[in-house]
Amino acid sequence: MLTSLPASLRGAAVAVLATAALTACAGPSSPPAGRTAPAQTGPPQALARDVPVLSGDYSGKLPIAAYSLTSAQSELIQSAEQKLEQTCLARYGISYSFVRQPETHTADRRYGLSSAEEASAYGYHLPPGPTVPAPPPPPGMLTVLRGEGATYHGKAVPKGGCRAEAVERVEGRYARPDISAAAAAIADGGYAQSMGQPAVVAVFRRWSSCMAASGGYHYASPMDPLDVPAFAKGRPGAREIPTAVADVACKRKTRLLPVWFGAEARIQTALIGERAGALAQLRRIHRAQVAAAKAVLKGDARR
């Protein structure tokens, strides 16, 4: 469940998710928005044969996902930071209730479209999610929340505002950018390297041939349709949905998804072995951040 804010405040909410994603290192930055899914804990699952041809969560099954914050842990941290934000705002006489948004579940898009249902209904567009209107911010809230001024009504505002203060309390004091960067490098690097693996190159060719035979759709890579400008604007057009349906059907026919997953998983497994010490430290950081969040929610001011 995500927090809803008016449009003028969504940057603050995005900052919560961006910080959590950086620390969790849940996936590469190269795929478009919506392609990755929240990571899961547990032992790495690196074998393509263990994964269905069409899975809803390839990202969460990759080895690096075992070193990521879970969706529940990320929400816990967000809730704690929101509580701290409200406490901070109250010091300036400002009251605001953050609104929870219903969670939207979409199929994983790390390797492009993977859901025949979504392809037939929305093409390459993301399915629309339910939204709950958020109340407008009261006067002065942005100034204090974002730290847009040094003072408010004569009282000093924390550097970066209540938002930065809350993040520092729960996450920042434990953060190690170098450790997070090591995990992100495995997620990003494994993804990039996988596209050059012979098995992946070969399955791309088979998928491309299947697309051409399915309706004259000419794409060299399954990521190429996602870059078509017409497929990202407005509503799905007359050509978009048939292309998307053929895309997923050809992935199923050629087993592109498990082949690509298997190649990336093997690369990630090797990279994880090289950075085992850093990743063990990342897990300790996550435990400390989750413990800090729980303490905040329990009202322990000593944490």
Image (spheres, rainbow, N blue to C red):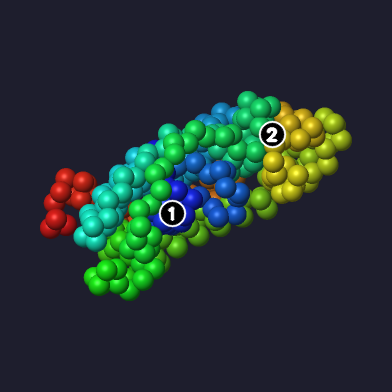
Label 2 sits on what residue type?
A: Gly
Specify whether residue 147 is in view: yes
Q: Nearer the viewer, residue 93 or 256?
A: 93
| Displayed quadrant of residue 232 | top right
Q: Position of residue 24 (x, y in %)?
A: 40, 52
Pair 1/2: label in front: 1
Quarter of the rendering occupied by the C terminus: bottom left
Q: Residue sitting at 36 percent across and 71 percent down?
A: 149
Label 1, residues with CA under 10 Å away: few <14, some 14-19, many ≥20: some
Mark found first going from the N terminus, 1 or 2 = 1
Task: Give the residue number, with chain letter if any, for mark 2.
Answer: 123
Q: Nearer the viewer, residue 81 or 220?
A: 81
Label 1 sits on what residue type?
A: Leu
Q: Is 100 located above or below residue 289 in the figure?
A: above
Measure the alpha-carbon separation of dots 1 and 2. 30 Å
| Displayed quadrant of residue 72 | top left
Q: Residue sitting at 59 percent across and 34 percent down?
A: 127
Q: Position of residue 193 (x, y in %)?
A: 61, 55
Q: Is 147 located above or below residue 195 in the figure?
A: below
Tag 2, which secondary structure?
Answer: loop
Q: Is residue 92 left or right of residue 18?
A: left
Specify whether residue 41 is in view: no
Task: Give the residue number, with chain letter if any, for mark 1.
Answer: 9
Q: Is residue 117 left or right of residue 254?
A: left
Quarter of the rendering occupied by the N terminus: top left
Q: Residue sitting at 76 percent across and 35 percent down?
A: 237
Q: Residue sitting at 31 percent across and 49 percent down?
A: 96
Label 2, residues with CA under 10 Å away: few <14, some 14-19, many ≥20: many
Q: Position of residue 181 (x, y in %)?
A: 45, 63
